[in-house]
Amino acid sequence: MKGRNKFFALALSAMMALSVCATAACGGNSGNGGNGGENPGQQQGGQSGGQSGGQSGGQSGGEQKTPEVKSVAIQYNGQTAEATLSANLSVRTLELQAAVTADEGASYTVAWTSSEPDVATVEGDGAKGTVTLNADGETIIKAEAGGKSAQLLLTVEDDLPPAKYTITVSGGVAKDANGQTVTEAEAGTQITLEANTVEHKTLSSWTMDPATVTLSGTTFIMPEGNVSATAVYTDTLYRLSLVGATITSVGEGEVPEATDGGYSGDVESSETKISNYGIKFGTQVTIKANAAAADKTFVGFDYLVENNRVGDLGVDEYTFNMEDRDSTTYTAVYSPIIKSVWAPVIPLENTAGEVYNPSQGSRVINGGDGDADLKGLSGFKLAFRGNAQGTTAAPENIRGSYYNLDHGRGMGKLILKNHSSTCTVKLQVYASFCGILAASKVVEVGPNEVVESNFELCFGMKDTWWGVQLRGAVNGSADEWVNVDMVLGIATRLYPNGDPMQDIGADAQFATYEYSNTPEDKANKDRYCKGYYGSNWHSDNMPEFTIDNSLGYMLFSSWGSSFGTGSDGNNRWAAFQITNMPEYVEGTDTTYVYGRATNMASNMQVDPTADYKFYIGSDLTDPTKGEEVSVHFDVTGDTVLFRFAVPRHSAEEKFYFFLLKENVENATASYGFGFVMHLTYNNVFNWTEE
């Protein structure tokens, strides 16, 4: 068969001299009297012949004998071959040699022939004969010279296994139809290429050698010859989906073209438009939120899932390195915005720094007054003396506001524009609601600079008072004035679809409280509850309690001075009737009430630590007769889980929630207290007993 590896599988019948002579082959030597023989018998014959020849020659007058070929033999591999020779077809060619014995001076040529050319042909080159094997069978190879010849019977066999060819794979393996890895195969075998898994790479193609090998997917048919295959990889592109945003830069390369992903939700707008990209792993990507509608503002990016906020608050650009997720989503979040927060009819109060001085340029700014830098927000133009030094005080020098945050946290968007060409101003803006304080960072505004600063507004703040204060020296002269535009907008829904602080679960069974019965509070009954207070509260500075029974929360806020200064700490308590205690069942002596409280207190001077005791009981005159829970807060944002085991005695019992403050950490008016609390009858907070 064609193309088999060349290897010899010769079966020689015998390795000895072969001389297949013509009819007179054996008699040639006996008549070679002139040359003599190689053995004593031949020598004797030579002598006899010489004598006879001499006599005859003398009688005939000196007649000479013509030199001639005496014999022909066929040799293979340097040895005289026997009468038969066997070879495997895969050998393809054999080299034979004709050994001719002749008289000195004899003239002859060697002729090679094959009786069956279909089986094998032979080509002569002098004494050498090259045999080409063509098919299995038998043929007689004959060598003839000077009338003498030799022949042998050549048998060609085809009984070896089919030839196999190597398969070399770079970047993967080759497998047969049974899924077994192979490195060689017979011609006609179906081979499947399987690429190695390379991290963050995708197989794009295979390079085949020889190029005539055709792939069907990853499969090819093995040819009569060796095959090499090389896997070619490209960078894997991972899906990046942006909702309400687009890519502004991708590493050092060009921004890829986005594919249209439609819109999220039912409203088609730039805020809901989905743009999809393919980005390779590890690439640094910068995204930017799309422009907000006129009545909204950007507040943050959600990563993967809702309310999983990343990036700086209100900053509409975010940079990250691409992950190797199948799909990564960033969603730009927009909130309704109040653009006129401060009541324009209530002017800013003057302070030592002359914050508001109409004679020096101070005025109310409405809707940005056409200045694009102020983004349509309202506020004031401030005036500071050039030699003002700043202070750590926090006066409430802006009275009145137009917003409430009953349903979650918000964001203040503060813009400051410095009109001075020489002085730098450092300002801080803050809002307070009893013990709950929200403040911007100290914002430094250089000469002729515009700076935007966003800050979080606490959950539950309502009808706040505000303040602005110089926090550093202006470093100007006493006779000059520095004007700074200060405008503010409030994003009322930092988490538009529900603040995580309120994300308790749809199956929460909230405790509810009795509303206030005063005419004023009845008009706002969803926000105010009726409280019963111990005798030591300061009547002119009572704490604030705000509830929303539909969302199940109670918000407490108070200044330190509200607790009074008397020694009878047990009188500093407040109680609120629970209106929906589970129905009393005879024989059931305990009702479990689960709670979660989060410290909302904030203060610019001291850490907002606090200790409280909570009770649920039925004696309105003595909280300590009820079931007690102690709560300690260290910093703003601390969350504490707890459980009451409330004894039950009859269906007629009334139960109250009590807050008791035994110790006041700081009794000054500047120290605030505040927390938000939820009570439920099922353990949705995953409270566990320590």
Image: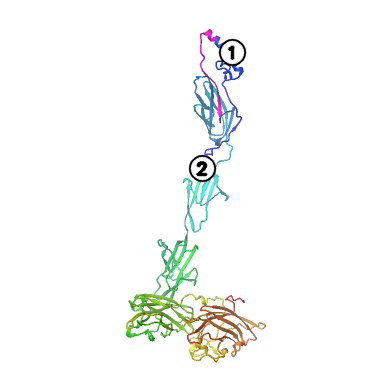
Quadrant of the rendered image containing residue 275: bottom left
Please report the residue visible at 43 percent of the width from the left and 81 percent of the height from the top: 430
Q: Residues within 10 Å of mark 1 (few under 14, many from 20)?
A: some
| Three-letter code, disc 1 | Ser
According to the image, label 1 marks what residue? 48
Residue 341 in sight in this render: no
- Where does the image place residue 447, in percent across and percent down from the top left? 35, 76
Secondary structure at badge 1 equals helix
- Where does the image place residue 640, in percent across and percent down from the top left? 56, 78
Q: Residues within 10 Å of mark 2 (few under 14, many from 20)?
A: some
Judge from the rendering whether residue 568 lies leftward or rightward of residue 208; answer left or right. Answer: right
Closer mark to the observer between disc 2 and disc 1: 1
Residue 66 in sight in this render: yes
The mark that comes first in sequence, 2 or 1, is 1
Residue lying at the far right of the rendered structure? 587
- Where does the image place residue 260, in percent across and percent down from the top left? 43, 64
Q: Please provide the residue range marked out in magenta.
A: 55-77
Q: Is residue 151 magenta?
A: no
Work out whether 177 lies above or below 684.
above
Secondary structure at badge 2 equals loop
In the rendering, which numbered label is found on residue 402? none
- Do labels 2 and 1 touch, CB within 8 Å? no
Q: In this figure, which colouring scheme has been used for the structure?
A: rainbow
Q: Is residue 62 magenta?
A: yes
In the rendering, which numbered label is found on residue 225? 2
| Three-letter code, disc 2 | Gly
Rendered-image quadrant of the N terminus: top right
